[in-house]
Image (spheres, rainbow, N blue to C red):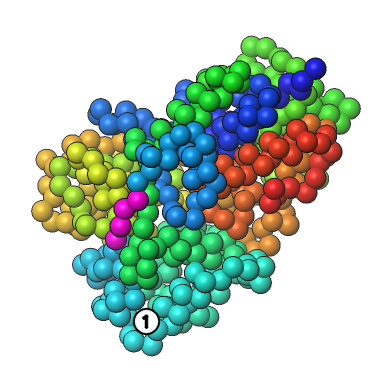
């Protein structure tokens, strides 16, 4: 008799795990609390446009993503575009992201530019991150670029995303973010990013169809209340109205929920989950009749704006209207997270009109706000050592979220890679193995 396998969460990692399982002959059941699949990559109807609630793009190094769209017959729907990066500083936009832009940047001395450029180049070329694992990121960057470049180009980014955690981040984690973008280039002067026709929903629809066609089951609006453990093994999953027997459970939901949903884990394991910290996000998505700028990614250093940047998605994926994502990151317990949607909308409206004075209120066609309490783990130095193994000391139980592919940043490709490999390990052996980097 084949194993009964439950997957908690229908984000990219959960879908990838289920996709791998059905390819291997299993028929998993996915439990998803939301009314749609996708997690942070899920889409919504934005006045007739199906688009992600949070911005997504793809880099040329996203191999796991490229592999799965090829398997699903979607490779022909992948598009690559040359994008540009800008920097809003001293009340004006300047080009950014290549050596010429760096040399012409107004606001830094030549020595500061040289030090910044050298650091970016070396980070992009670096492959071994072990020496950075236990380094603190702000100090690492500051030693390389100096105080001047740190103040102009980095400090507010750290402060406005990580707040009180800004001085306790892993250098390896920050390095991986620099390298991913730095390596997605056709040359040192040209940035190359990608998108699927139809956005992430194209991939999500294909994964969902593949899973269900092969006999897998996806249950939406079905939050799991408890994973039942008996005699150090998984026995069942309890939902709102019923309990169902399973031999294996693969959880891909955010780790802060584990303490509540799997309270019978060993105390030491629960403690390791409990101390993990996350950043929340309030993401404003705005539809405009005019574009804000020619740049896909606009870094921002402005004392009047409490954001580190904005993403003009329609400068990557051509759309009828101009689409801008403006994320506000903060700890979930920060008072600002409780502000109303209207507060954030008013801020963004004023910001885009300041950046581009030709934009008026009548140019704002529509605005929506999405919130995610656990948007991103806060990875402190030596982060991986603090995580329990993905294969927990409970027979048949596997737990991971985006934290587990440290030092890589959260992303669809990494979630696919980790989800597929975790599914393989979960069905190859009953014994937990050290599997953070499965």
Using the image as rendered, state which of residue 71 and residue 255 is in the foreground.
71
Using the image as rendered, state which of residue 170 and residue 51 is in the foreground.
51
Provide the residue designation for mark 1: 113
Residue shown at 43% from the left, 69% from the top: 155
Instruction: Report the number of discs.
Output: 1
Using the image as rendered, state which of residue 155 and residue 27 is in the foreground.
27
Q: Residue placed farthest to the bottom in the image?
A: 111
Q: Is residue 58 magenta?
A: no
Could you tell whether 387 is left or right of 240 in the image? right
- Asked if residue 337 is positioned above or below residue 38 in the image, the reply reads below
Pointer 1 local density, CA inside 10 Å: few below 14, some 14–19, many at least 20: many
Screen quadrant of the N terminus = top right
- Name the quadrant containing residue 381: bottom right
Q: Which x, y percent locates residue 133?
A: 65, 66
Q: Is residue 81 magenta?
A: yes
Q: Which x, y percent locates residue 286?
A: 26, 41
Q: Is most of the magenta stretch helix, strand or loop?
A: strand
Residue 277 in view, yes or no:
no
Residue shown at 53% from the left, 25% from the top: 210
Using the image as rendered, state which of residue 17 and residue 63 is in the foreground.
63
Residue shown at 63% from the left, 39% from the top: 420
SS at circle 1: helix
Could you tell whether 358 is left or right of 123 in the image? left
Q: What segment is highlighted magenta in the picture?
A: 80-84
- Name the quadrant containing residue 130: bottom right
Residue shown at 43% from the left, 82% from the top: 115
Q: Which x, y percent locates residue 299?
A: 33, 62
- Asked if residue 149 is positioned above or below residue 128 in the image, the reply reads below
Residue 66 in view, yes or no:
yes
């Amino acid at each position: 008799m084949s194993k009964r396998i439950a997957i908690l969460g229908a984000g990219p990692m959960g879908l990838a795990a289920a996709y791998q399982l059905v390819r291997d002959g299993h028929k998993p059941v996915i439990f998803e609390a939301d009314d749609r699949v996708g997690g942070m990559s899920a889409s919504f109807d934005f006045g007739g446009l199906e688009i992600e609630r949070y911005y997504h793009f793809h880099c040329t190094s996203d191999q796991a993503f490229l592999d799965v769209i090829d398997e699903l017959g979607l490779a022909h729907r992948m598009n690559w575009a040359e994008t540009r990066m800008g920097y809003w500083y001293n009340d004006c936009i300047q080009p950014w992201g290549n050596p010429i832009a760096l040399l012409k940047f107004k606001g830094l001395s030549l020595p500061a530019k040289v030090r910044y450029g050298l650091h970016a180049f070396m980070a992009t070329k670096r492959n071994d991150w072990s020496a950075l694992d236990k380094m603190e990121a702000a100090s690492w960057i500051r030693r390389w670029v100096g105080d001047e470049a740190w103040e102009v180009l980095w400090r507010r980014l750290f402060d406005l995303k990580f707040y009180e955690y800004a001085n306790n981040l892993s250098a390896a984690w920050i390095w991986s973010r620099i390298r991913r973008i730095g390596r997605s280039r056709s040359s040192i002067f040209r940035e190359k990013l990608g998108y699927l026709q139809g956005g992430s929903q194209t991939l999500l629809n294909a994964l969902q169809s593949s899973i269900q066609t092969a006999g897998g089951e996806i249950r939406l609006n079905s939050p799991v209340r408890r994973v039942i453990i008996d005699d150090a093994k998984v026995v069942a999953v309890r939902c709102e109205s019923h309990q169902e027997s399973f031999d294996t459970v693969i959880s891909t939901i955010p780790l802060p929920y584990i303490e509540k949903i799997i309270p019978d884990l060993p105390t030491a394991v629960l403690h390791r989950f409990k101390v993990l910290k996350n950043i929340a996000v309030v993401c404003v998505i705005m539809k405009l009749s005019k574009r804000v700028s020619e740049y896909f990614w606009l870094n921002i250093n402005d004392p009047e704006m409490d954001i580190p940047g904005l993403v003009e998605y329609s400068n990557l994926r051509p759309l009828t209207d101009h689409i801008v994502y403006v994320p506000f990151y903060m700890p979930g317990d920060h008072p600002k997270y409780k502000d109303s949607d209207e507060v954030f909308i008013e801020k963004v409206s004023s910001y885009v009109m300041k950046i581009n004075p030709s934009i008026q209120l009548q140019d704002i066609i529509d605005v929506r706000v999405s919130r995610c309490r656990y948007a991103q783990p806060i990875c402190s130095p030596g982060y991986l050592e603090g995580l329990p193994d993905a294969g927990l000391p409970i027979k048949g139980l596997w737990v991971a979220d985006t934290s587990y592919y440290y030092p890589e940043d959260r992303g669809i490709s990494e979630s696919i890679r980790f989800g597929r490999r975790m599914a393989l390990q979960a069905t190859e052996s009953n014994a937990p193995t050290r599997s953070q980097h499965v």
